[in-house]
Amino acid sequence: MKQALEQAKLSAKHGEVPVGAVIVHNGKVIVKERNKMRELNDQTAHAEILAIRKALLILNESRLKKCDLYVTLEPCTMCAGAISLAKIRRVYYGAEDKKGGAVDNGVRFFSAKTCHHKPEVIGGIEEQAAGLLLTKFFALRR
Amino acid sequence: MKQALEQAKLSAKHGEVPVGAVIVHNGKVIVKERNKMRELNDQTAHAEILAIRKALLILNESRLKKCDLYVTLEPCTMCAGAISLAKIRRVYYGAEDKKGGAVDNGVRFFSAKTCHHKPEVIGGIEEQAAGLLLTKFFALRR
């Protein structure tokens, strides 16, 4: 999660909402990504989506069954859907997102009947640090 | 929707689950896409996601507020999230997806409190043709 937080900080430096994600396979970090919606002019370019796409290519696998995702913010609905489709084993997230989250807030997708792969979820890892980055980022822009 | 169906047929020819999507801007088709999960080895490469990403680049806009999406199958949770993030104006879809849909089935994301842009939705357009393509595709593989 420390490495995901570094990615989130890098996002803020680039004027992006500070969220970072890391994918671990066999105890090794194989991908580090961050939000790039502005940089790529792509609303789907959330840290998690970019990390999943890259990990699938690196491993040359159709699913990420042996991979764990570390992300600084609770995944949104789009990302929760992608995590499930990619069959990620475990999700560790930092700050909760009451406004846009879809894991422990909102549609709680992993508990839905239409969710066909439910990862193990551990929330609140480095929660304060992750939340503070977001608070600071938005405070500077208001 | 006819053009989206053509894309779906093309998907099947490539061994992909037959779903096609088209984005219309100012009455003009600007993007045609289809499922490419196998081709790109990317579980996020649903027709809708690819179409949204391409339309954002073509229009060089950060959102697709004046765009309508035609897709042959009810969008899944990931795609419903992406449609909302991209602020697509209207979604026309073909067949319902009771197992994986997230618009009129499953988490019904556009009605959730965590959905911050709700497109207008018109379902059941060329429903039979869209559904038949899927039924045939899976029948051949079972």
Image (cartoon, coloured by chain):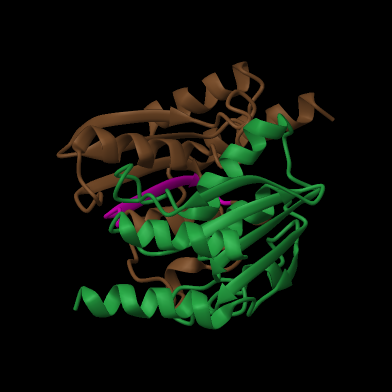
Chain colours: A brown, B green
Count of residue discs: 0
Q: Which residue is outermost to the top?
A: A13
Left or right side of B89 for B71: left
Q: Is residue A40 above or below residue A96?
A: above
Q: Position of residue A117 (x, y in %)?
A: 32, 66
| Quarter of the rendering containing residue B112 | bottom right
- Residue A124 in percent (x, y) is at 47, 49
Magenta stretch, residue numbers: A87-96
The answer, for residue A132, to whether it is visible in the render is yes
In the rendering, at what x and y percent does residue B76 appear? 50, 66
Q: Residue pushed farthest left?
A: A26
Residue drawn at point x = 66 percent, y = 32 percent = B58
Front residue of A139/B124: it is B124
* Residue sitting farthest toward the right: A142
Give me the residue at 34% from left, 66% from top.
A118
* Quadrant showing the C terminus of chain A: top right
Q: Quadrant of the N terminus of chain A?
A: top left
Q: Would residue B132 be found to the left or right of residue B93 on screen? A: left
Residue A74, placed above or below residue A119 = above
- Residue in view at x 43 percent, y 80 percent: B132
Between A90 and B4, the one nearer to me in the picture: B4
Which percent across, then down, holds residue A71?
44, 41
Which corner quadrant of the image does residue B40 belong to? top left
B11 horizontally vs B91: left or right: left
Work out whether residue B76 or residue A142 is closer to the camera in this orientation and state it: B76
Specify whether residue A94 is painted magenta. yes
